[in-house]
Amino acid sequence: MGNKVYKIGFISLLVLNILLTLVIWRGPKPPLQGGGDADFKNRISEDLGLSEEQEKKYFASAMVHQQQMSALQQNHRKLVKEYFDFLKLSDIDEQEKNEKLEAIAKTESRKAEITFKHFEELKAICNEEQQEAFENIVKNLQQVLVRGGGNNLPPPRGN
């Protein structure tokens, strides 16, 4: 009986080690030099057929865009938290609450402006042939932005 327990333990540990090795080996890809979603950036670069020089400019722009968006997202989270902290108060200052809501709206507006500018920069580095393919990129971008990049909460359930 003791031998059987050792065999089962050995096989279990072996299987766990193999699984762990696979998880580590196939783990998340490190972000590329340009920041942001590497798959999305690479897909855009491939779809447009960017040259090496164009790709360098695009990835540099993407890095700046990602840094700006990250800072705005961090600020957005802080503002939303502060806005909902008003619910903890017994007496809510409506002017303060409205100012916080305006700040949230300005942050969202700024995110849209920064993203628009980033894709204007991409469009500017494209040649005529790539400009045609750029229209499809815009369609895909609109779908991603409407979905919120997968960060949206699921819709509420009906009772």
Image: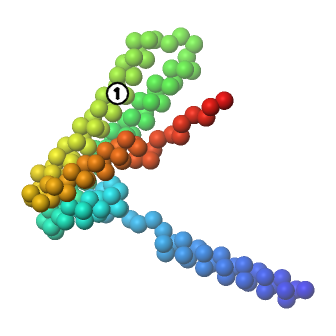
Q: Identify residue for label 1.
A: 105
* Outermost residue toward the bottom in this view: 3
Q: Tell me which amino acid carries mark 1.
A: Ala
Q: How many marks?
A: 1
Where is residue 134 drawn, in percent x and y?
Answer: 20, 54
* Helix, strand or loop under label 1: helix
Left or right: 100 in relation to 63: right
Q: Looking at this view, is 35 or 52 the one in front?
A: 52
Where is residue 19 drawn, in percent x and y?
Answer: 60, 75
Q: Looking at this view, is 71 or 26 the one in front?
A: 26
Quadrant in the picture for the N terminus: bottom right
Q: Is residue 42 above or below residue 139?
A: below
Q: Residue at x 44, y 47 (%)?
A: 150
Location of residue 50 (image quadrant)? bottom left
Q: Dot 1: within a 10 Å radius of its alpha carbon, few (fewer than 14), some, or many (20 or more) residues?
A: some
* Outermost residue toward the right in this view: 1
